Image: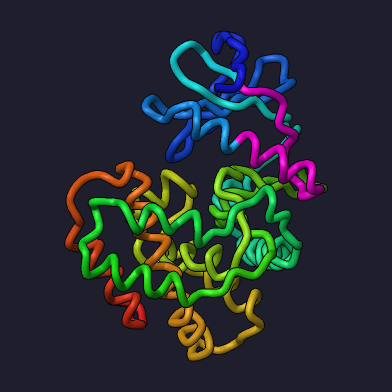
Amino acid sequence: MSKYEKINLEDYIQTGEGGQALTYTKKDGSSLAKMFMHGLGSETVEHEFLISKAVYEAGIPCPKPIRLVTDGERFGGEYEVIAGKRSFTRIISQEPEQLEPLSLKFARLGKQLHATPANTAVFPDMKEVIRPWIEKSTCISEPLRARLLATLDSLPSPKTCLHGDFHIGNIITDGEKDYWIDLGDFSYGAPEWDLSMNLYLAYYMSPENMDLLFHLDPATFRKHWSILVRTYYGIQTLEEQQACEKKLLKYTALKLLFNFCKRYNGQGAPNPQLEGLANAFLSGMAPGVL
């Protein structure tokens, strides 16, 4: 295990929360500690820290990784503080008129990222990140597993960068420069991997979770998604958007089951409702949407 430096969280103030971690800013403003929840071991923390370091060294704008830290119970990484930073979602929640310009900017920044050649000696192929979870997890039924693996094998693996957790909450700005954050799933492959889960978030995330994670309501996120997908792919009509969404569904099915397996460490019984949704996606259908 890499060396962790002990910190005292009394020297920090909690300033953020996410699905897997809480963030604490040092009272002197010099750094930010991202502390993962209890139960998430050092391997997860070290992977994200090392990937973040590689992204930073590749010249992709992100906060500088400083060191691995622990408070004696949890593990985390300490990063550069971006003074005056706000996430795009926080800005939109406070200034609704910023929805369109920030969604347009996010689409452009995403295209730039996806056009960046990836160092394949450092970053993994997203297909091969997903594959072992689909192959080995008990929480996927055998018929669905076969469909997922066949679909996975059919997908391309271009050698360009992917964020891995690509959504408008994972980009921050100080008003002059924009930075990517939460880089633990950074990889390479087809940009559809990054776009696909935004489709799921737009149409299927509960209002409670949407507010918790993005400080937005579902209708606002759907507007953001429409701007994002139309700008990214250069489309204009609803019919073109629907056709594009249909092409993303197979990626959405794989990412959805991948995230489900990770959440439960690949253990447990299949979820019939989730499997039904994944099978519909694999068949080119999005219940209640298309």
Is residue 229 placed above or below 210 in the rendered structure?
below
Tell me what residue is drawn at x 21 percent, y 62 percent: 141
Q: In which quarter of the image is the C terminus?
A: bottom left
Tell me what residue is drawn at x 68 percent, y 48 percent: 122
Q: In the displayed structure, does residue 240 sit left or right of residue 78?
A: left
Is residue 227 placed above or below 259 in the rendered structure?
below
State the image coordinates of residue 62 (x, y, percent, origin top left): 73, 43
Residue 41 location, quadrant: top left
Could one spot residue 94 in this view of the protein?
Answer: no
Tell me what residue is drawn at x 51 percent, y 82 percent: 244
Q: In the displayed structure, does residue 218 sit left or right of residue 60?
A: left
Residue 51: in magenta span: yes
Tell me what residue is drawn at x 33 percent, y 50 percent: 261
Q: Which of 208 and 232 is in front in this view?
A: 232
Q: Which of 224 and 242 is in front in this view?
A: 242
State the image coordinates of residue 286 (x, y, percent, origin top left): 33, 77
Q: Quadrant of the N terminus?
A: top right
Is residue 49 placed above or below 174 in the rendered structure?
above
Q: Which of 91 and 142 is in front in this view?
A: 142
Label total for image: 0
Q: Which colour scheme is used?
A: rainbow
Q: In the displayed structure, does residue 118 sit left or right of residue 186?
A: right
Residue 233: in magenta span: no
The stretch in magenta equals: 49-68
State the image coordinates of residue 89 (x, y, percent, origin top left): 57, 51
Could one spot residue 140 in this view of the protein?
Answer: yes
State the image coordinates of residue 124 (x, y, percent, origin top left): 59, 53
Residue 189 location, quadrant: bottom right
Is residue 21 placed above or below 95 in the rendered structure?
above
